[in-house]
């Protein structure tokens, strides 16, 4: 009982910490999904049920006024789902009769990773299907394969990528027996029937529905060297945060923060050495090793194909734990995993709750103020185009701020033209405005030099600088641009 209480203490402290220290800058998708929910745009072809589910929960709880900020509500709900996923994993391991100490070590291993820490508080989709797939695994190990198939099929409707977990679990070991394919057929039938029904009702080609992002040119389809490079980088980042923003945080809090980072890194190395020294690496396979290993491999291959997308690697720690028989592999791992928690907490979790490394809202406020000065005392109905390096996250954040601003601010901005943030591309550049932000992650001394020389180096475009500021974060500049005939 005491060891179970320790589990709940760990989860409670972790959840409270994540709730009270959310990032000041969310991902572009977090803002994008929030905007779509507020506008009632609930359709998404590769995770069909996600926004419909969130919308229903939001409509039920909105009258209670628990959260004024809808993005914080959606992010908190995602955190609750992530914690529920860890709880279901614990139930699965209890049913396997793992000792409480090894369950505790397995849970620490899962929650210590950077991927888990970063994405559980974002308004993303990923932990909804992970929870459903884990519930499917729970029933699968109880030999209730048809019940498992329904949960795994539902997970695919929250995100297509969970087709790999479904296939891994339900693909029969004895492939020669026809009846053993029935659970797999049921699991696949749920998403397939859904897509066929939508295709018929909307009179849309089913291929376009399933592969919408491919047809829209939103994803890379031909692998190159970046697939392998980013795959290995993000395999590491799934557990251990490595990013240029870490150097920025060191600049902001020198000399102490970089010193803390070095000490924690030494602690991690020490924990890893002790782990290797104190035990023999005996990998004992679970009874369902084939199923989970197949799901793990399929997920790894697709993550590589998706240019090493770390978001598609969030399932890997869960699947890895489920391949193990009794958790003996985690013996003596406590120092190492605690070190990972300390690193990811101090080098990302806390700094992101106190710092805006990309200055997204600053850029939007500066752009709005300058455009207001450019169009004084007149109602301008035309959309003003602003070309920038981070167009997607800028546009999503701008739309979210407009949708959630109070009536007074909405009235004051009603005479302003609409802003549209577009990707900076010299070949398709039009007259309008441009904004550039150059990070000062590595060396603050470099910030005394002009950071926009390459940005302005084009004889066919006239640049007029309207704003510039320099700080530890980087150099921010705003230009009026005119394409010369």
Image: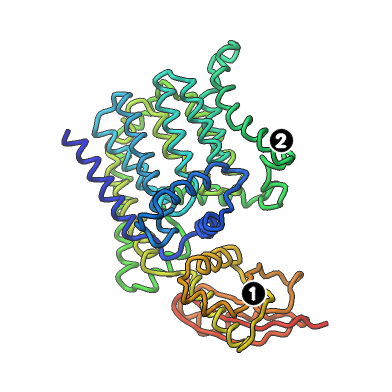
Residue 392, image quadrant: bottom right
Of the numbered discs 2 and 1, the one sitting upstream in the chain is 2
Residue 200 disc label: 2
Residue drawn where x is 38% and y is 39% of the image: 85
Quick one: label 1, few (<14), some, or many (20+) residues within 10 Å? many
Taking depth in this image into account, of 346 and 352 the one nearest to the observer is: 352
Q: Is residue 174 above or below residue 354?
A: above
Residue at 32 percent across and 39 percent down: it is 107
Residue 369 in picture, x, y percent from top left: 54, 83
Q: Residue at left 33%, top 24%?
A: 96
Q: Which residue is mark 1?
A: 386
Mark 2 or 1, closer to the camera: 2
Depth check: give the residue in front, 219 or 143. 143
The answer, for residue 265, to whether it is visible in the render is no
What element does badge 1 sit on? strand
The image shows residue 171 at horizontal and vertical percentages of 55, 22
Mark 2: secondary structure: helix
Applied colour scheme: rainbow
Count of marks placed on residues? 2
In the rendered image, is residue 48 in sight?
yes
Crowd class of label 2 (few under 14; some 14 to 19; many from 20; radius 10 Å): few
Q: Could you tell me which quadrant the C terminus lies in?
A: bottom right
246, 84: nearer the viewer = 84
Figure quadrant of residue 426? bottom right
- Using the numbered discs, state the Cα–Cα distance from disc 2 to disc 1 in whole angstroms: 40 Å
């Amino acid at each position: 009982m005491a060891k179970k209480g320790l589990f709940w203490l760990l989860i409670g402290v972790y959840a409270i910490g994540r709730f009270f220290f959310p990032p000041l800058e969310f991902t572009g998708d977090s803002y994008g999904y929030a905007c779509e929910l507020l506008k009632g745009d609930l359709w998404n072809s590769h995770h069909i049920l996600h926004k419909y589910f969130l919308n229903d929960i939001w409509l039920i709880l909105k009258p209670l006024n628990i959260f004024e900020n809808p993005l914080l509500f959606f992010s908190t709900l995602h955190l609750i789902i992530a914690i529920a996923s860890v709880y279901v994993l614990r139930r699965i391991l209890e049913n396997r009769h793992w000792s409480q100490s090894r369950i505790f070590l397995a849970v620490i291993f899962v929650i210590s990773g950077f991927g888990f820490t970063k994405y559980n508080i974002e308004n993303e989709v990923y932990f909804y299907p992970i929870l459903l797939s884990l519930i499917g695994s729970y029933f699968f190990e109880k030999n209730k394969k048809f019940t498992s198939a329904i949960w795994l099929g539902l997970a695919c409707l929250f995100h297509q990528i969970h087709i790999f977990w479904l296939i891994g679990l339900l693909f029969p070991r004895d492939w020669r027996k026809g009846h053993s394919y029935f659970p797999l057929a049921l699991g696949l039938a749920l998403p397939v029937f859904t897509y066929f029904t939508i295709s018929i009702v909307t009179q849309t080609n089913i291929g376009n529905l399933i592969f919408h992002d491919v047809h829209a040119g939103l994803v890379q389809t031909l692998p190159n060297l970046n697939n392998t490079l980013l795959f290995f980088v993000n395999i590491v980042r799934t557990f251990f945060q490595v990013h240029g923003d870490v150097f920025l945080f060191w600049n902001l809090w020198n000399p102490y923060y970089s010193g803390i980072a070095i000490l924690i890194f030494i602690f991690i190395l020490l924990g890893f050495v002790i782990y290797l020294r104190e035990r023999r690496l005996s990998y004992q396979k679970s009874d369902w090793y084939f199923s989970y290993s197949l799901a793990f491999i399929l997920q790894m291959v697709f993550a590589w194909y998706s240019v090493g997308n770390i978001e598609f690697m969030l399932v890997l720690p869960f699947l890895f734990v489920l391949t193990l028989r009794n958790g003996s592999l985690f013996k003596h791992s406590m120092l190492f995993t605690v070190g990972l928690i300390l690193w990811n907490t101090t080098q990302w979790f806390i700094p992101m709750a106190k710092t805006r490394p990309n200055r997204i809202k600053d850029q939007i406020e500066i752009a709005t103020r300058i455009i207001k000065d450019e169009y004084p005392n007149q109602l301008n109905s035309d959309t003003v185009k602003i070309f920038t390096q981070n167009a997607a996250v800028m546009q999503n954040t701008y739309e979210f701020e407009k949708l959630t601003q109070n009536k007074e601010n909405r009235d004051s901005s009603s005479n302003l033209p609409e802003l549209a943030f577009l990707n900076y591309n010299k070949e398709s550049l039009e007259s309008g405005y441009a904004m550039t932000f150059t990070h000062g992650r590595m060396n603050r001394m470099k910030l005394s030099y002009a950071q926009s020389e390459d940005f302005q180096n084009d004889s066919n475009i006239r640049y007029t600088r309207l704003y510039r500021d320099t700080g530890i974060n980087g150099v921010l500049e705003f230009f009026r641009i005119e394409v010369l005939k």
